[in-house]
Amino acid sequence: MTAQSAMKIENANYERVILAIERLTVSNPKYCQCMRCRLDVTAIALNSLPAKYFIAPSPMDIEEIASPLLMVEASVLHALERVLGHPHHEKPAHKKLTDDIKKSLEKTKEKNME
Ligand SMILES: [Zn+2]
């Protein structure tokens, strides 16, 4: 493998966005932690931040290329709220309620059978 083929384009904000999602979802259980929602939040946040692509490996310090932490967190928070309002799956609270109703219906059926 040549040195050039080992090079790739990376986004300096990627790691920061991942870490911010981790931090913000752990401290706030209202945000869904499923893979689909995380990917949506990652894409939305990265799209809303300035493009910070660079060729890796780079002699430059990623910390210097990346957007400021507060800016990354603000974008992630905005993305989390957007995905919370419009998840690409049934809303968890709604799903749980439906499951609970199904379960109690099944129990009622079983009782009637006895
Ligand atoms: Zn989800």
Image (tube, helix red, strand yellow):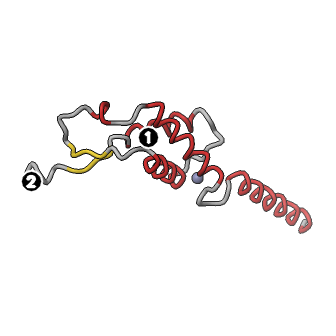
Q: Residue furthest bottom?
A: 113
Q: Cα distance, mark 2 to mark 1?
A: 31 Å
**Residue 67: quarter of image:** top left
Query: Residue 50, position in %: x, y?
Result: 39, 44
Circle 2 Cα neighbour tier, 10 Å, few/some/many (<14 / 14–19 / ≥20):
few
Asked whether the residues under the numbered discs 2 and 1 touch, taking CB atoms below 8 Å apart as contact, a structural biologist would say no
- Pick the front one: 51 or 28: 51
Residue in the image at 66% along x and 60% along y:
90
Foreground label between 2 and 1: 1
Q: Which element type, helix, strand or loop, lies under badge 1?
A: helix
As drawn, the label of residue 1 is 2
Q: Is residue 102 above or below residue 32?
A: below
As drawn, the label of residue 42 is none
Residue in the image at 50% along x and 52% along y:
35
As drawn, the label of residue 17 is 1
Q: Check mark 1 vs ligand 1: CB closer than 8 Å? yes or no.
A: no
Q: Which element type, helix, strand or loop, lies under badge 2?
A: loop
Instruction: Judge left or right: residue 58 versus residue 97.
Output: left
- Pick the front one: 93 or 10: 10
Query: Residue 23, position in %: x, y?
Result: 51, 33
- Label 1 is placed on what type of residue? Val
Circle 1 Cα neighbour tier, 10 Å, few/some/many (<14 / 14–19 / ≥20):
many
**Residue 110: quarter of image:** bottom right
Query: Residue 85, position in %: x, y?
Result: 66, 52
The quarter in which the C terminus is drawn is bottom right
Q: Check mark 2 vs ligand 1: CB closer than 8 Å? yes or no.
A: no
Query: Residue 3, position in %: x, y?
Result: 9, 48
Number of numbered discs present? 2
Q: Earlier in the sequence, mark 2 or mark 1?
A: 2
